[in-house]
Image: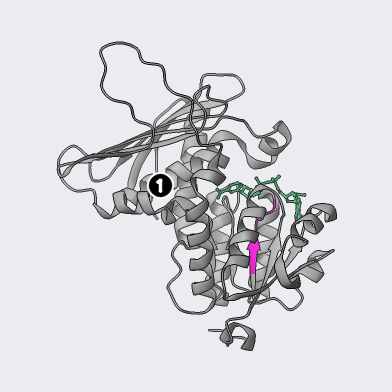
């Protein structure tokens, strides 16, 4: 175990932030709102983005790092919010320097890579928390706390957005399942606490803007995930959980009707609006981990298990087969 730096002991954590885009901006605000965070140093390949963000910080608590070398200089913790292909190299650098790190999902594009970096972090005793923020959403936590036991165990999830990311973003991020539905795949693992047995993934449109996933579990439960970008009904995350104890729902579910009803356009703009609280709680948890005050709530081992589901979905899309999920 590495010795805790004096700045961390004083509750004056110096954080490095890689990436000042959509999610980097959210994490920047959460960090600055937390009294334990002293300063945030922001590195973005687009220096103007980093500058725009840092000037919004009160009391000169933020600065710009013009290179990765500057970013890693004198920091106690790192938040990686840069594009997906940059996660592994930045994380490896952080682990080699013993810097506890919050890394946005996905850590890498294949579970074998996540497994390797998890082994490196474990060998170095470096805490790495992964950005599966649904786990920190108070409403989803309440549903998860009810458990998943007995009877017909079903999870029914609908996850849509009003807009699609740019083609350039999607190319680097790996598409709908690898970039977005990875959250829902993590959610079904976390919420059920069960080992997935198999997955089946289908997409019908050429651009793969919509998909349907089915996950079966060792304990006889089943989860279905409908996902899509550019829904005319806008943003939604509806989660219905059913077992012997009852059926409960979070989201945009409408009453039973015997005639077609118009689905009202969502009033939620996007994930940042829906999950603002969850993101702040997630970053506060990371600062707890940095201070040695709590166990890592979302470790690389969790990311490995979720990435195996993503890998299995990718195989299912290609083979049009039901794919078993390895449990190693
Ligand atoms: N957990 C979540 O809810 C959530 C939401 C959105 C994005 N993400 C993840 O966060 C990451 C960033 O997504 P985004 O939507 O913020 O993207 P974005 O395109 O809005 O922002 C990325 C930023 O990183 C900068 N950048 C590019 N290369 C860099 C490098 N080598 N070092 C530092 N900065 C660099 C870009 O200039 C840009 O400003 C992705 O991996 C994505 O999967 C997670």
Residue 194 visible? The answer is no
Residue 81 on the magenta segment: yes
The residue drawn where x is 63% and y is 63% is 79
**Magenta span:** 78-82
The residue located at (59%, 72%) in the rendering is 100
Ligand 1 neighbours mark 1 (CB distance < 8 Å): no
Count the marks: 1
Q: In the image, is residue 302 part of the stretch drawn in magenta? A: no
Where on the picture, by quarter, is residue 293?
bottom left
- Can you say whether 200 is above or below 327 in the image? above
Name the residue: 83% across, 64% down: 67
In the rendered view, does 268 fall on the left or right side of 89?
Answer: left
Instruction: Tell which of 236 and 241 is nearer to you.
Output: 236
Q: Mark 1 — residue?
A: 187
Q: Position of residue 131 (x, y in %)?
A: 53, 55
- Res 309 seen here: yes
Residue found at the very far front of the displayed protein? 58
Provide residue 42's location: percent of width, then percent of height: 74, 63
Please indicate whether residue 241 sits to the left or right of residue 252 in the image: left
- The relative height of residue 26 versus residue 185 in the rendered view (above or below) is below
Magenta-drawn stretch, dominant element (helix, strand or loop): strand
User: How many residues crowd around disc 1 within 10 Å: few (fewer than 14), some, or many (20 or more)?
Assistant: many
What percent of the width, then of the height, locates residue 164?
A: 62, 31
């Amino acid at each position: 175990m590495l010795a805790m730096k004096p700045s961390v002991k004083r509750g004056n954590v110096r954080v490095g932030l890689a990436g000042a885009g959509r999610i980097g901006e959210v994490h920047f605000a959460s960090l600055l709102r937390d009294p334990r965070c002293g300063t945030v140093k922001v590195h973005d390949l687009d220096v103007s983005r980093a500058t725009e963000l840092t000037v919004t910080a009160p009391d000169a608590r933020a600065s710009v790092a013009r290179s990765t070398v500057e970013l890693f200089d004198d920091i106690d913790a790192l938040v990686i919010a840069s594009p997906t292909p940059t996660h592994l190299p930045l994380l490896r650098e952080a682990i080699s320097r013993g810097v506890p790190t919050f890394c946005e999902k996905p850590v890498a594009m294949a579970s074998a890579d996540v497994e390797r970096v998890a082994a490196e972090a474990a060998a170095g005793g470096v805490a790495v928390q992964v950005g599966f923020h649904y786990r920190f959403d108070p409403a989803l936590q309440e549903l998860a706390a009810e458990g998943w036991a007995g009877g017909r165990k079903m999870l029914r999830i609908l996850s849509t957005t009003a807009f699609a990311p740019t083609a350039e973003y999607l190319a680097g991020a790996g598409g709908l399942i690898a970039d977005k539905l990875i959250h829902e795949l993590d959610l079904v693992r976390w919420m059920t606490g069960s080992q997935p047995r198999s997955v089946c993934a289908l997409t019908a449109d050429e651009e793969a803007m919509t998909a349907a996933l089915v996950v079966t579990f060792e304990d006889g439960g089943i989860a279905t995930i409908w996902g899509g970008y550019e829904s005319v009904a806008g943003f939604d995350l509806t989660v219905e959980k059913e077992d012997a104890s009852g059926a409960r729902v979070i989201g945009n579910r409408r009453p039973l009707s015997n005639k077609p009803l118009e689905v009202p356009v969502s009033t939620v703009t996007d994930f940042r609006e829906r999950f603002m609280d969850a993101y702040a709680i997630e970053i506060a948890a990371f600062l707890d981990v940095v201070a040695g005050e709590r166990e890592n709530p979302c470790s690389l081992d969790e990311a490995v298990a979720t990435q195996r589901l993503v890998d299995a979905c990718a195989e299912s899309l290609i083979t049009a087969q039901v794919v078993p999920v390895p449990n190693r």
